[in-house]
């Protein structure tokens, strides 16, 4: 009944209906720009600190302060701002300064000058952090029109990548979930227009086109991450396996020229021998949905051949609710109330599909696969001690019904290889609490036997600002999963749980196929903000597009 009620209220949308407009503006200086809030990007070297007292050091900033009626001095006098990376200042009214037209001024630090770069070795770059802080300032100040300026103009050849990073951060940084509330949020962002003031950008048509493309890329990435957030935050009485299939259909309807969809029902999965996946789904009232979304460039479709295109797959864990089964999640720390996010891997996979479909990379065919289901408890449900037969013929003794995600992924990985012909696969899953214990809530685990895949994922993550840490594939730990009656058990012992989970998945990868497993259990949800993060979508898209001819 509740599911039907929420549908009737129109709360099943898959992405926001509106995003702020973002554009480069090369015809204005910070002084001539008119709008609600001007945000000035500065460095630590622009300030001088003596015995805890901050003052303006840069002559350029002193001149700027004069033009803005001592607004910079007013910010410094408020205290707490020294230009450190990603740190926003207070917002002050500009007043009646004749040389400035912005109503309010704030600053955001880029950090130390020597470390300023669009490529961060770890986490977000200073420009991505700038964008996030811009969103925070716009939201807190209820600003509709925001301009972003740089005290020291970046190199002209960096305009495109800087634009993409700032815009992405700004479009995602002010996120607030409101669609399941009965009244509009009084704290929701009012941002409508974002201007990047980059007057030194080259004026040639080609350069302008490149910069515009960068902004379009940022918008595409943002929409993919927002779709991921929408799916992860949706309660389990809304986000069912059918809802995930409908999200895939929404993407196909939005991008019909490059996306196609096949959803396998239970009977079709039975015919394929997917006993591992269906064993998990057995106790739920909601039928399983095996989702296969395919991206093919229009050029490939016209040629009718994939010989010149690499075939890759993104596989996402799609447990729309995980009770734990008969090994039920119980007691403090079980997080059963948060198990709506156990489909975070599926959400990231579909978010990546949205990014890729909008940007249309050439030279790569991408298959997005989600074995969606619930893990519930019922008389016909999976029991500890049951033996399942996976689609590849391997048998699994279930010694823990709460180690269910890997059972669904086993058949999904088989399908990616046997039915899609994928030669490179990345799976993403909120797979183990052990990975959260090991890496915390900000860092995802990267497991792969391939150094090549590890470097590719690392490169993709550096471009997106997401954090992944490579974990060992300690082969000897698989001894924990040896079974006296089946080919393997589905869970090992108490220690090294994220590693044994990855080793289990490796049993379903054919020789010659490159594969990486991303355990995103920690960073999929921001505990402090109590919000989904959209983690994984941009890195998955970056990796897949790097296999072809176009990168983010």
Image (cartoon, grey):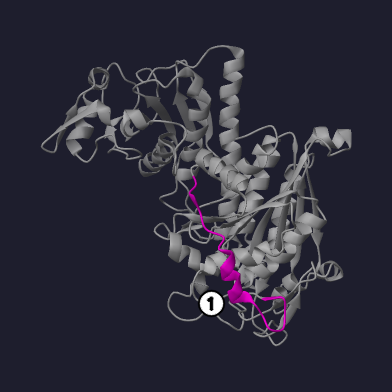
Q: Residue at x 22, y 41 (%)?
A: 80
Which quadrant does the C terminus fall into?
top right
Q: Which residues are magenta?
A: 466-488
Place of residue 493 in the rendered image (x, y in percent of width and height, measured from the top left) = 53, 77
Horizontally, is 218 left or right of 515 in the view? Answer: left
Quarter of the image for residue 328 reads bottom right
> What residue does disc 1 label?
493
Horizontally, is 143 left or right of 459 in the view? Answer: left
- Asked whether residue 87 is drawn in magenta, I would say no
- Asked whether residue 468 is drawn in magenta, I would say yes
Which quadrant does the N terminus fall into?
bottom right
Place of residue 209 in the rendered image (x, y in percent of width and height, measured from the top left) = 61, 20
Quarter of the image for residue 269 reads bottom right
Residue 273 can be seen in this image = yes
Depicted 498 relative to depicted 401: above or below: above
Q: Residue furthest top?
A: 204
Residue 11 can be seen in this image = no
Q: Residue furthest bottom?
A: 379
Place of residue 237 in the rendered image (x, y in percent of width and height, measured from the top left) = 62, 69
Place of residue 305 in the rendered image (x, y in percent of width and height, measured from the top left) = 87, 38
**Mark 1 burial class by Cα count in 10 Å: few <14, some 14-19, many 20+:** few
Depicted 63 relative to depicted 346: above or below: above
Q: Residue furthest right?
A: 304
Local secondary structure at mark 1: loop
Horizontally, is 76 left or right of 415 in the view? Answer: left
Q: Residue at x 87, y 69 (%)?
A: 271
191 or 272: which is nearer to us?
A: 272
Depicted 305 relative to depicted 102: above or below: below
Horizontally, is 473 left or right of 420 in the view? Answer: left
């Amino acid at each position: 009944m509740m599911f039907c009620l929420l549908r009737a209220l129109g709360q099943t949308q898959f992405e926001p209906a509106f995003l702020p407009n973002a554009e480069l503006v090369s015809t204005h200086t910070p002084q001539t720009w008119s709008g609600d809030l001007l945000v000035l990007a500065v460095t630590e070297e622009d300030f001088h600190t003596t015995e805890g007292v901050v003052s303006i050091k840069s002559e350029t900033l002193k001149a700027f302060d004069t033009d803005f009626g001592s607004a910079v001095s007013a910010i410094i006098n408020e205290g707490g701002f020294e230009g450190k990376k990603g740190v926003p200042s207070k917002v002050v009214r500009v007043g009646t300064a004749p040389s400035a037209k912005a109503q309010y001024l704030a600053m955001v630090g880029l950090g130390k000058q020597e470390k300023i770069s669009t490529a961060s070795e770890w986490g977000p770059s200073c420009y991505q952090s700038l964008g996030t802080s811009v969103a925070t300032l716009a939201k807190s100040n209820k600003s509709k029109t925001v301009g972003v300026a740089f005290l020291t103009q970046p190199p002209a050849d960096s305009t495109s990548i800087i634009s993409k990073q700032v815009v992405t951060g700004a479009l995602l940084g002010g996120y607030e979930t409101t669609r399941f509330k009965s009244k509009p949020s009084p704290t929701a962002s009012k941002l409508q227009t974002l201007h990047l003031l980059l007057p030194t950008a080259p004026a040639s048509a080609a350069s302008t086109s490149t910069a515009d493309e960068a902004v379009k890329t940022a918008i595409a990435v943002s929409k993919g991450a927002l779709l991921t957030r929408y799916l992860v935050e949706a309660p389990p009485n809304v986000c069912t396996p059918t809802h995930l299939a409908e999200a895939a259909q929404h993407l196909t309807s939005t991008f019909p020229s490059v996306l196609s969809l096949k959803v396998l029902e239970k009977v079709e999965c039975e015919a394929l021998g997917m006993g591992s996946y269906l064993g998990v789904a057995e106790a739920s009232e909601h039928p399983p949905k095996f989702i296969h979304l395919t991206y093919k460039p229009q050029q490939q479709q016209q040629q009718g051949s994939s010989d010149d295109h690499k075939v890759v797959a993104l596989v996402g864990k799609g447990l729309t609710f995980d009770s734990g089964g008969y090994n039920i999640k119980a007691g403090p720390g079980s997080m059963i109330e948060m198990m709506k996010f156990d489909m975070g891997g599926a959400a990231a996979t579909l978010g990546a599909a949205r990014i890729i479909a909008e940007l249309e990379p050439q030279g790569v065919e991408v298959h997005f696969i989600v074995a969606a289901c619930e893990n519930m408890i019922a008389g016909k449900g999976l029991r500890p001690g049951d033996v399942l037969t996976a689609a590849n013929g391997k048998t699994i003794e279930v010694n823990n019904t709460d180690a269910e995600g890997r059972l669904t992924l086993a058949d999904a990985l088989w399908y990616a290889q046997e039915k899609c012909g994928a030669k490179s696969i990345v799976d993403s899953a909120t797979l183990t609490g052990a990975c959260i214990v090991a890496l915390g809530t900000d860092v995802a685990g990267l497991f792969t036997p391939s150094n090549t895949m590890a470097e590719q994922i690392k490169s993709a993550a550096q471009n997106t600002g997401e954090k992944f840490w490579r974990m060992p594939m300690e082969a000897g730990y698989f001894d924990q999963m040896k079974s006296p009656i089946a080919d393997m058990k589905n869970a090992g012992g108490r220690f090294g749980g994220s590693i044994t989970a990855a080793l289990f998945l490796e049993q379903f990868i054919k020789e010659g196929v490159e594969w990486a497993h991303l355990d995103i259990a920690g960073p999929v949800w921001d505990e402090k903000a109590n919000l989904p993060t959209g983690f994984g979508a941009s890195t998955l898209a970056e990796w897949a597009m790097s296999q072809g001819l176009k990168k983010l």
